Image (cartoon, rainbow, N blue to C red):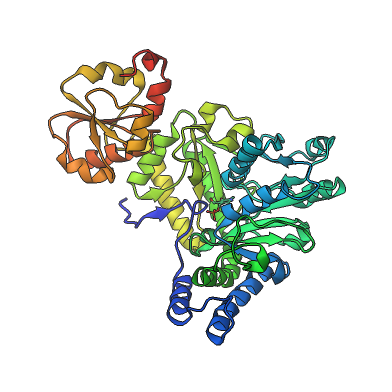
Amino acid sequence: MFEFHRRIDWDANATTSVSASVRREMVRILESIHGNPSSPHRIAHDAAEVLEDARMLVGSALGVEPTSIHFTAGATEAANQVLRGAVRLPGSCRRILTSPTEHASVLATLEDLERSEGVQVVRLPVDSRGVLDLRVLEDAFSEPADLVCCMLANNETGVVQDVGAVVEVAHRRGARVFCDVVQALGKMPVDLAAMDVDFANISAHKIHGPKGIGALYVKSGCALPALHTGGHQEEGRRAGTEAVHDIAGLAQALRDLPRQLGNCEGVRAVRKEFEEGLSRILPEVEFASGRGTGLCNTVHARFPGIPNSVLLGWLDHQGIAVSAGSACNTSSDRPSHVLTAMGRKETAARESLRFSLDPALSPRLLRRQARIVLGKIDDYLRGKVPDVQLLTPATLSPLLQDPRVLVVDARHSVDRKWIPPLSRAVQISWPFGSHLEELPKDRFVVFVCQVGFDAPILAWKLRKSRKGPVGFLAGGMMAWKCSPNNRSNPN
Ligand SMILES: Cc1ncc(COP(=O)(O)O)c(C=O)c1O
């Protein structure tokens, strides 16, 4: 049956759209309030009031005092401040314990501190569900540490850690705990005081607020140096004039949050039906953290034998946005660090997709979307898709000299510097889709991209408008570069 649908965004863990109420509130503030909150007059006072109202809302959403909340330009900045600050404090032993499944904002910052400052970073193993082992944490305190990083909910798998138990161990051993609650907020209750964490961060764009704004929680009595120098805004913790309209947007998103939280049980029910549906159409499907556990909205599934780039491309072509992991890592070829830390083989990591439902949508709408997504996956599995040829480096290699074949290189110039184009490949520039009309109709068009996500989308798009053969290189130029066939013969 033909079902019309607008785009389905099942990538809510990457970001969410700005809601109508947030947009209205931000416009209201932009139109009516322009003062610098730090200035000493009435106009400034109006702006300062917006900040203090927002601070109260953040504090109450997280179960802590408003005075412990500081606005930042997003969660990444807040994480940087905590990690870089922790090792600058007098008496710091410059040793940090972390779970290896943290977000890139933590892991990349720790790598940098390791490299540039000689900080000792200990990455504790997790079990096959991605859960931190408390005995391993306890053992890691055979030497003192300043800080433990443990996120509440994982952005890729949705697995939820027992942060209260982690805090108990860390505090007993004299370490502070930084907890990234970015993904948990709005998908489960978050009470920082009950968990007793020392530092935490949130991000507005994950809860239908604007991008580039977030907040840092610093427990009263915990010292933390500022990340950069400047004015004394945010109690000296974050220099720079506050983005009043963005902060008002974050506050409005938090006002709307109880409604979203009220949806969570319904969202979990849809998720369960979706997981059951996947198992019905593909019994071999595997769920990264087990079925039904973790965040209400996140399904992380492995489709054995199917490269995630191909299924992702097919779904995108059908107007359905999903993801192969964290949005911060899509331009890299490395398989998900979360899955590898959970002991999955590289192939398994490359066959996994994340479906993150938007918990602000009604379960009724999500159920309708789930039916469509399942239908499109089923079409793919039954081969009911336009005929597009999937090429590997081995099958593409002999075609490169064939004059009837046109290889189209759909990559950004920076990627071409890193891996040179195939000989005789035609290069098209961003936006790649706008060049499809120009391609000759009498040749077998083969798209190649960097890591394999763009080419299948282009191939299916082109196939829709023409009869001739179309193909793409699975895994992109990265697969080409790594292929034993082509190591000695880059072109
Ligand atoms: C778990 C987690 N932490 C931190 C971040 C970074 O947030 P921001 O985009 O506000 O810097 C994200 C967003 O991708 C995330 O999912």
- Residue 400 spot, x, y in % from top left: 24, 20
Instruction: In the displayed orientation, state which residue is furthest to the bottom.
Output: 42
Whether residue 151 appears in this view of the structure is: no
All told, the count of numbered labels is: 0
Identified at 60% across, 65% down, the residue is 71
Left of 396 or right of it: where is 301? right
Identified at 25% across, 22% down, the residue is 423
Residue 296 appears in which quarter of the rendering?
Answer: bottom right
Asked whether 62 or 426 is in front, the reply is 426
- Residue 458 spot, x, y in % from top left: 28, 39
Asked whether 213 or 81 is in front, the reply is 81
Q: Is residue 254 above or below residue 333?
A: below
Asked whether 64 or 349 is in front, the reply is 64
Q: Is residue 424 above or below residue 128?
A: above
- Residue 412 spot, x, y in % from top left: 33, 39
- Residue 426 spot, x, y in % from top left: 22, 31
Left of 30 or right of it: where is 120? right
